[in-house]
Image (cartoon, helix red, strand yellow):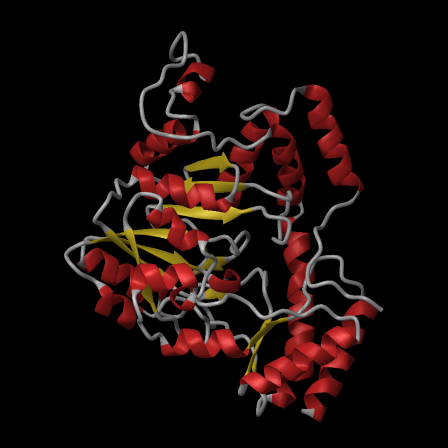
Amino acid sequence: MHVPLHKPYWGKLAEDAVIRAMRNGVGAADGPETKMMRRKLANLTGVRFAIPVTNCTHAMETAVACLGVKTGDEVIVPSFTLSATATAVMIRGAKPVFADIDPLTYCLDPKDVERQITHRTKGILTVHYAGMAGPNFDALLTLAKKHKLWVVEDAAHGIGSSYKKKALGTFGMAGALSFHGTKNVAAGEGGAILTNNSSLSSQMEIFRSIGTDRMAFLAGKVSAYRWVGEGSSYMLSDILSALINIQLDQIDEINKDRNHIAAMYTTSLSSFDDKVQLPSIPKGMTQPNWHIYALKFVRPEFRDLFVRKMRKNGIEVSAHYMPLHTSPMGKKVGGGCRLQVTEDVAATIVRMPIYAGMTERELEYVVSTASKVLQAI
């Protein structure tokens, strides 16, 4: 049996949605499906403004640019993340400053963030790893307010997740979502920016529209759209919006499936706590979407052995990020800093297969195989 790491939740409804979008237009941005996507995201997250963009990287680039980041500025980011979190800062000529993470949830550690703040610091770009806010998220927000820093949330993992019953991506000045093919809601590529700030929303609409007031034109507010500011073309195809829309309608079903898989893993693997640390959920605070179910091994060699044996049995498991501060580019940007927790997590973590539509037979095979491998380690 072969079990993949992830799989999009696509079926006949998704196919019909894409065909409908193809027949109703030319696939260009801001058509009827994109307008519907804005409404669905606003309703799901409770946010005032939801702006579709080409991907989560462009969502972060747009937010950082419109918050006025410039050459000489610094923005604090986790090192345990995709490079996009840092390049969104670098593309403005600013410096990403790497901070360490919490050892249980792998989200930014506010204490280490505070140590990195200087007179050049303008903001914090935080990541909700695995679709969870860390137990110290309130402390991070308080810290930002104390130092008059903005917060942008990299909520690429976070669609359908909440913290204290409020959607991830809606706490800071802006939040960035991803609809990459590996995500809970997947369109191959795609993203969105969330914000409650009307002025920032207006700036971001211009930035994503090649620096034009195109949205004002489409709303009938101007007779022709004009070049009015800086920007690029970060507009999402209406065809991809249609694929996203159908899954937004199915988000409860998608996340229910993933919750079931996560619960099965936790129940079945909890007896191996001398070898692996299971995911930690801040109780009464976070409602995860289980975008990721990660095991953290007590020793790197245990992790490597587990990966080899699971793959030998046809089960795709994976390590995760190489810490940015230890990567070739990260060394150039951040110097020779040491982030102990980040380095430990990166050396010992394994992502388990988890996706909506996983059959009970597949799930039982993964659990039984993982149990046998762990018992033999």
- Residue most toward the left? 119
Choose top left, top right, bottom left or bottom right for residue 136: bottom left
Where is residue 142 drawn, in percent x and y?
A: 25, 61
Q: Quadrant of residue 108?
A: bottom left
Q: Horizontal and vertical percent for residue 366? A: 75, 74
Left or right: 270 in relation to 346:
right
Query: How many numbered dots are placed on residues in this image?
Result: 0
Establish if 347 lies above or below 211. Answer: below
Front position in the image: 269 or 343: 343
User: Residue 217 location, x and y as percent?
Assistant: 43, 15
Q: Which residue is drawn at 43% across and 12% down?
A: 220
Give the vertical position of 240 relative to 218 (above or below). below
Residue depicted at 45% across the width and 47% down the height: 176
For image coordinates 35% across by 71% down, the residue present is 100
User: Is residue 8 depicted above or below 194 in this figure?
Assistant: below
Q: Which residue is drawn at 43% across and 26% down?
A: 209
- Viewport quadrant of the N terminus: bottom right
Using residue 55 as the reference point, say whether residue 266 is left or right of it.
right
Q: Quadrant of the C terminus?
A: bottom right
Residue 162 relative to residue 357: left or right: left
* Residue 49 picture location, percent across and down: 42, 36
Q: Does residue 371 appear anywhere in the picture?
A: yes
